Amino acid sequence: MSLSEDVRRFPYWYHRIELPDGVVTPGWAPIDPAAYRVPKDLTGKRVLDVGAWDGYWTFEALKRGAREAVAIDDFSDQLGTLKKNDRQAWATFDFCRDALGYDDARCNRREMSVYDVTEARMGRFDVVFFFGTLYHLRHPLLALDRLAAVTDELLCVETAILDDNSVYRGGLGNGYSGSEVVMEFYPGNEYGSNDTNWWVPNLNCLMRMVFAAGFPHATGWKLMEAPKQVPDCRGFAQGRRQSVSPADSKSH
């Protein structure tokens, strides 16, 4: 059986991952990898990927030179539409890891909650990826605190944001894009018909949350300035222990 035929054995792919022989998994995320502004050079870094799913960013860290990448996930997100068997735990991750030739020592994965991340259990990390996860958490600031406690250099966050979309203000085109520091709470499936979506901040709030978690140098930006659909209402924040020079900032 060919690699492309093997890919089709899995009922659902979230990530679009480039595998050998020109094979690409049929996922849709990330929408725009460059928008994440992950450093191009991660040589020698130890990286944690939270909410790894199929493993796009885990493998990307290794492609960029990381000495080790650790992936964690608790498989709780079904996107509001997937059947239970559509997410087959680590099956897609393991499949891609094998195809890309990474071993368990350099590319480790663990089923665990972000709330359970501690230095005693995981060690320390130079860089932490926290993508597509914050809005699925009942306690987002606690999660940021847990991650900050094991991050030595850089925390990268991506999440849904309220700047151009608010469930309670009329939907798309009606958000909080000014000076407000706002986060909305969804006790049911109000956001995206997904009952695992709990909180969404605006960008101003997101940056301040990262700052409050212990990163004195926090920046943020939107995926796009004028999103035309709710899935594009996304934002990013990065928290650094130290400021970066203009030369360094161009390396993303």
Image (spheres, rainbow, N blue to C red):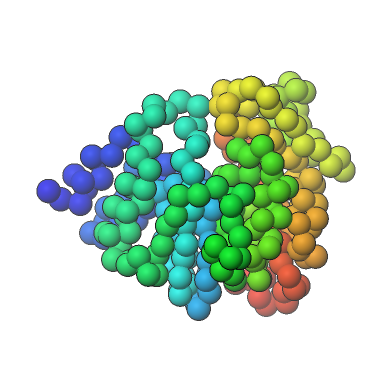
Residue at 50%, 77% in the rendered image: 43
- Estimate the x, y position of residue 1 in percent, counting from the top left: 12, 48
In the image, residue 177 above or below residue 174:
below
Residue at 58%, 44% in the rendered image: 133
Q: Indicate left or right for 40 with 134 as reference.
A: left
The image quadrant where one finds the C terminus is: bottom right
Residue at 24%, 40% in the rendered image: 8
In the image, residue 47 above or below residue 141:
below
Quarter of the figure with residue 125: bottom right
- Estimate the x, y position of residue 50 in percent, counting from the top left: 54, 53
Q: Indicate left or right for 135 with 168 as reference.
A: left
> Can see residue 226?
no
Outermost residue to the right: 179
Quarter of the figure with residue 229: top right
Residue at 68%, 24% in the rendered image: 187
> Can see residue 155?
yes
- Estimate the x, y position of residue 107 in percent, counting from the top left: 40, 64
In the image, residue 165 above or below residue 14:
above
Nearest to the observer: residue 82 or residue 148: 148
- Estimate the x, y position of residue 108 in percent, counting from the top left: 41, 62
Q: Indicate left or right for 14 with 126 as reference.
A: left
Q: Indicate left or right for 105 with 181 as reference.
A: left
